[in-house]
Image: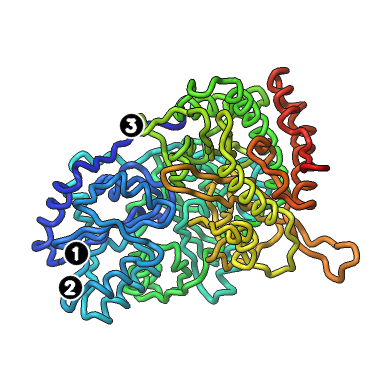
Amino acid sequence: MFQDFETSASPDKGKERVDALRSLFDELEIDAFLVPRSDAFQGEYIPDSEARLAWLTGFTGSAGVALIMRKTAHVFVDGRYRSQVSDQVDTEVFTPEDLVENPPSKWLKLNGHQGLRIGVDPWLHTIAEIKALEKTAGEIGATVVRLPANPVDRIWLDRPAAPSGKVSIQPLKYAGAPPKEKLAAIREAISKAKADACILTDPSSVAWAFNIRGEDVPHTPHPLAFAIIEKDATAAIFINEGKLDRKTRAYLTQLADIRDPDAFADAIADLASRNRAIMLDPALASSQIASLITDGGGRLVEHPDPARLPRAIKNETEIKGSRAAHKRDGAAMTAFLAWLDRQQPGSVDEISAVKALEKARRTTGERMQAPLKDISFDTISGAGPDGAIIHYRVTTTTNRTLEPGQLYLVDSGGQYVDGTTDITRMVSIGAVGEEEKRWFTLVLKGMISITLLRFPENTRGVDIDAFARIALWKAGGDYAHGTGHGVGSYLSVHEGPQSISRRGMQSLEPGMVISNEPGYYRDGAFGIRIENLVLVHEPRSIEGGDKPMLGFETLTLCPIDRHLILPDLLDRDELQWLNAYHARVRDELAPLIESEEDRDWLIQATEPIEQNGS
């Protein structure tokens, strides 16, 4: 299994671990310490050796930070984890806080005091985060103390070893462009920014630029590595050589100097000492890297990661691969959903469902000679009230049976060498109530609304996010997450800079892959989310129109549970799209389904829907 169902986090150890951390405050001359969920690479997935927040607090979500004061302790999480944090941490020790509405910098402005000394590990906070913290500190007369070592590591006596996953080459037939071409484009961006060099701190950017993949973290196939690219055609990649075999070492030496990660800080200092202007993304790079540049005499050029946007805009080879991966994944999802439909309500639990889905992906991939390399994230398998926990992760402790009358939410994805998938489907376990059907149909209306949108160039995600929410808003509902995130090409399932959300300031450009996943959640009762991945297509003419418009091509192929739809809540265009989508799903997936029983289920699941009186 790519997914396990245990958790190493220990909420019952929170008090003793916080006390141990506080015992170091006098020696370090601090009054507070920030413990982010991040590592030095600022990625979504981190190795076990970097999971300081989970070890200290018990919270295992993908975004959060703890603020440990001398007398109080606080855990800041966003809306996705509101329920989860209360379940996972000892709330007699930690007070949950809102990471979006009241982040640490804002909380300290209201609750901090003059003379307060706030300790940080500058490798674990971005330039932007430290700037915000220092601004607040200046306003209240406090001080941000950059510590030379992380005090959590001193008390974490059984800390796991750093990862050593093997590096592989991403073949040109899947990457679509050679690394020398990508590095040349990065060097052009360096020159345009009037810089001498660029530091890539996002491992996905390093993986994309050099056409390599790795196994250092769960579910995201990039190696943990930094790179320095200079505009004069020299480059260095900082990676543990134990991760490289003879083939990958020979491949990389043609593109860059291979250096040990321990040499990274000295290399930055050396570059800075030569009065170089060095480009760094303030939203992605650790504050410590910026300090190494400026303290060493270099000039910091704050600029977006030059690999990030090109990586988000897929080339034709990557688009072709994504389409193939989604067909394969759709066949696997169909096999899983057909299997689940044949089970008696109450006979399957959340864990056995996850195992069946991973088996379907493995079996289908092997049969189609394109093996599943990993899942793209831990499958969210939520029955009834667990579905209301937006980023729920089932464990042996929380495992719930899928009971009659419940909604079951399954959000999952696969990593294939030609593409990354992410899909959410709802399943009615037996007959569910009209209330659940009504909210499901309203969420479906939002998903279809995004799907059918046509929009001019330079339209941003923030400009269209509301289209997914209008039907819910009219009914007095909403959801506490974005509508869509970017998706990589056999890389991170959550990829920027594009998103459909209230913070989506990047314009949507042809070639971008993005999720379309509105939802609705009722704490303690049920959760609903419907998700397809879509591809932004080139501007196309509209009959009778004056200007070609961008739009979306749906990549995900999988039936949407017809038992949950109230047809009379759909308008004519929505119903027409749904029936056309199901016809496409049936036509494209049926030839890929090996089992006649599963194929018959697919045909029934994609029958046209009619409104009452039609």
- Where does label 2 land, which residue? 116
Callout 3 amino acid: Thr
Q: Is residue 249 visible?
A: no
- Given residues 569 and 10, the one toward you in this image is 569
Residue 89 horizontal/vertical position (percent): 27, 47
Where residue 142 sits, quadrant-wise, is: bottom left
Q: Are marks 1 and 2 in contact (CB under 8 Å)?
A: yes
Q: Which mark is residue 32?
A: 1
> Which amino acid type is marked by label 1?
Ala
Q: Amino acid at mark 2?
A: Leu
Cα–Cα gap, marks 1 and 3: 33 Å
Foreground: disc 1 or disc 3: 3
Of the image marks 1 and 2, the number of the one nearer the N terminus: 1
> What is the C-alpha distance between the residues marked 2 and 3?
40 Å
In depth, the one of 350 and 309 nearer the eye is 350
Local packing at callout 1 (Cα closer than 10 Å; few below 14, some 14-19, many 20+) is: many
Expressed as whole percent of the image width and height from the top left, the position of residue 206 reads 51, 53
| Viewer-side label of 2, 3 | 3
Task: Estimate the x, y position of residue 146 in percent, counting from the top left.
Answer: 24, 67
| Vertical side of 119 occupied by 208: above or below | above
Mark 3 highlights which residue? 397
Secondary structure, mark 1, is: strand
With 97 as the anchor, is 572 left or right in this view?
Answer: right
Q: Quadrant of residue 25?
A: bottom left
User: Looking at the image, which residue is at 18% across and 62% down?
Assistant: 69
Sequence order check, earlier mark of 1 and 3: 1
